Image (spheres, rainbow, N blue to C red):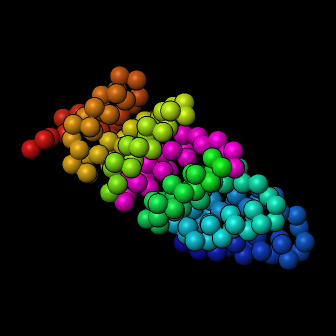
Amino acid sequence: GGDWQAAVSFFREMQTLGLQQNVYTYTAVIRACNRAGRWEQAVELLQEMKAVGIRPNVVTYNAVVSAMGKGGMWELSLKMYEEMKTNNVGADVVTFNALITACGKAWKWARAVEVFETMKLTAVKPNAFTYKTLVRACEEGGQWKLALQLYDEASASGLDMDGVRRGQFSTS
């Protein structure tokens, strides 16, 4: 769990030595914070990089969105997506998967479905992880018919739904 602390410490030492920071160094430290579920530190680093004039990229934002989701901050993750749009940083499948995961983890199946619909409108192609996460969110929310519909949609698209059985959906 201390890897993120070592990453931040090393990053700060680089700054103290006057070494130039860039989007890659910031993103690496933010990703370490994400892996540890330290969303507050990820956000602090994101704000800092913007304050010094370094433009975050999609990988940077994805790490922050994911960290927020791990921390149960699904609403903040959705706001971060809005910031991405404002800053003309195009979302990718990783972005949408992190948003769907965040909403699903917070028992917000309807919001997860909204994110999925937005994903399709932006022409980002869902993958098996997208569907598995969304099916799980709907299932946990008692939305069996929708879960079954999504499962069938994924299967019809040729996606491997390994680990999800069609027969597990029950309306009883």
Q: Residue furthest front?
A: 86
Residue at image coords 37%, 60%:
106
Magenta part, dominant SS: helix
Q: Quadrant of the N terminus?
A: bottom right
Q: Position of residue 157 (x, y in %)?
A: 40, 23
- Please report the bounds of the magenta region as a residue range: 87-106
Q: Is residue 2 above or below residue 85?
A: below
Residue at image coords 35%, 22%:
156
Q: Position of residue 129 (x, y in %)?
A: 44, 41
How many labels, in total? 0
Q: Residue furthest right?
A: 18
Residue closer to the observer: 78 or 13:
78
Q: Is residue 66 left or right of residue 145?
A: right
Residue 165 visible in the snapshot: no
Q: Position of residue 163 (x, y in %)?
A: 32, 40
Q: Residue 29 lies in magenta, yes or no?
A: no
Q: Is residue 139 left or right of residue 111?
A: left
Q: Quadrant of the C terminus?
A: top left
Residue at image coords 68%, 63%:
46
Q: Is residue 40 above or below residue 154?
A: below
Q: Position of residue 149 (x, y in %)?
A: 28, 31
Q: Quadrant of residue 116?
A: top left
Residue closer to the observer: 11 or 156:
156
Residue at image coords 47%, 60%:
75
Residue 23 visible in the snapshot: yes
Q: Is residue 63 left or right of residue 49?
A: left
